[in-house]
Amino acid sequence: MGSATTQALVATTAAIAETPGLTLDVSGELFVAARALADSPQLSGALTDNAASPQARDKVVGDVFGPSFAAQTVSLLRTAVAQRWSSVDDFVDAVEELAIRAAAVADQGDLENELFGVLHTVSANPELELALGSRLGEASAKGALIERLLDGRFGAATRLIASSIVQRPRERRVRQLLERAIRIVSDQRGRVVASVRTATALSDQQRARLAETLSNRYGTPVALNLVVDPAVVGGLRIEIGDDVIDATVASRLSDLRQRLAG
C-alpha cells in the first residue's frame, strides 16, 4: 500500500463517521459500486486519473451513480474519488472497505463473531472454498450460493458482506477476503482481532475472561477468533497482529525435543 493510499484511507474512514443515516442498503450499493469499478477499467481509471480535475471526477460519480444510489452512497463515493490513490486496485479495495464499514455501522449485532463463523465454515470445507474461489462460474451465482448457505444462521449484514466479497475476489482467496472483512469491522468498532487456537472449545466464561485479559494487556477492546485445533494438545496459541503468545503443550513438547536433540 502506497503512501497516497494510506492518506486517502484516513479520509474515507473519517467520512463514514461523518455520514448520518448509514443503512445496509447503502452498504449494498457500495458493494455494487465496487463490483462495477472492478469490472470496468475505463470507469475506475477515469475516477483515479490524477490528471483530471476533482470536479471532473466528481461529475462522473454523479452521472454514473447519482440517479440510482442513495445520497449517502454518492457522498461517500465522492469523498473517495476526491483522494489520490497509489493504484486503481487500491481505489476499488477502498470502496469495498467503505461498504464493509457501512455495514458495521448499520448493524450493531455480533457481526465479527458471525463472520468468524463463516470463515470457519469455509475453511472446514475445501470443496466450498474451491467453488467460491474458482474463476469459473458466474459471480452472482457464487453470491447466491453463500446467501443460501447462511440463510437462517447469520444476520443480514453478515450475509451481505460474505455474499458480496466472494463475487469479485480479484486473485484473493475467500478466507483472505473474510479475514480482511473481520479486521475492517473490528477497526470500525475500535477493536483488534485475536486469533486463538485451543485443543477444545472454551466456555463462555473462559472466553469472557480471556477477552478481558487481552483487552487490559493491549489497552483496547479485543475480539476473539476462536479455532479448535487438536494439534495444540492443550493450552493456547494467541496471535494479535505481529504478536504471538504460544502457551500450548505442543509447543513445549517441541522445545523439549529440540533440547534433548541438541
Image: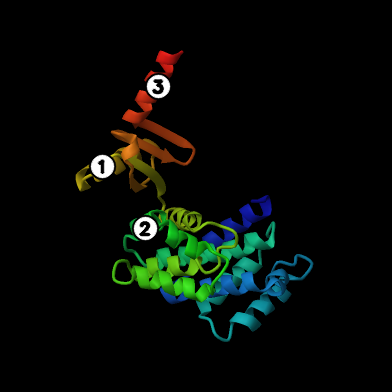
Q: Secondary structure at mark 3?
A: helix
Q: Residue at 49% across / 59% down in the picture?
A: 174
Query: Viewer-proximal residue, 195 or 20?
Result: 195
Colour scheme of the picture: rainbow
Amino acid residing under circle 1:
Thr
Q: Quick check: 215 above or below 56?
A: above
Amino acid residing under circle 2:
Thr
Of callouts 2 and 3, the N-terminal one: 2
Q: Secondary structure at mark 2?
A: helix
- From the viewer's perspective, tell me whether residue 155 is left or right of residue 140: left
The answer to whether the residues at label 3 and label 1 have Cβ atoms under 8 Å apart is no
- Local packing at callout 1 (Cα closer than 10 Å; few below 14, some 14-19, many 20+) is some
Q: Quick check: 186 above or below 231?
A: below
Marks 1 and 2, how far apart at CA? 17 Å
Q: Position of residue 258 (x, y in %)?
A: 43, 19
Of callouts 1 and 2, the N-terminal one: 2
- From the viewer's perspective, tell me whether residue 138 is left or right of residue 147: right
The numbered mark at residue 58 is none
Q: Which residue is mark 1?
A: 200
Which quarter of the picture shows residue 202?
A: top left
Q: Secondary structure at mark 1?
A: loop
Q: Which residue is mark 2?
A: 121
Q: Which residue is mark 3?
A: 255
Q: Residue at 29% across / 67% down in the picture?
A: 153
Please identify the residue farthest to the bottom as the structure is shown. Answer: 67
Q: Position of residue 59 (x, y in %)?
A: 68, 79
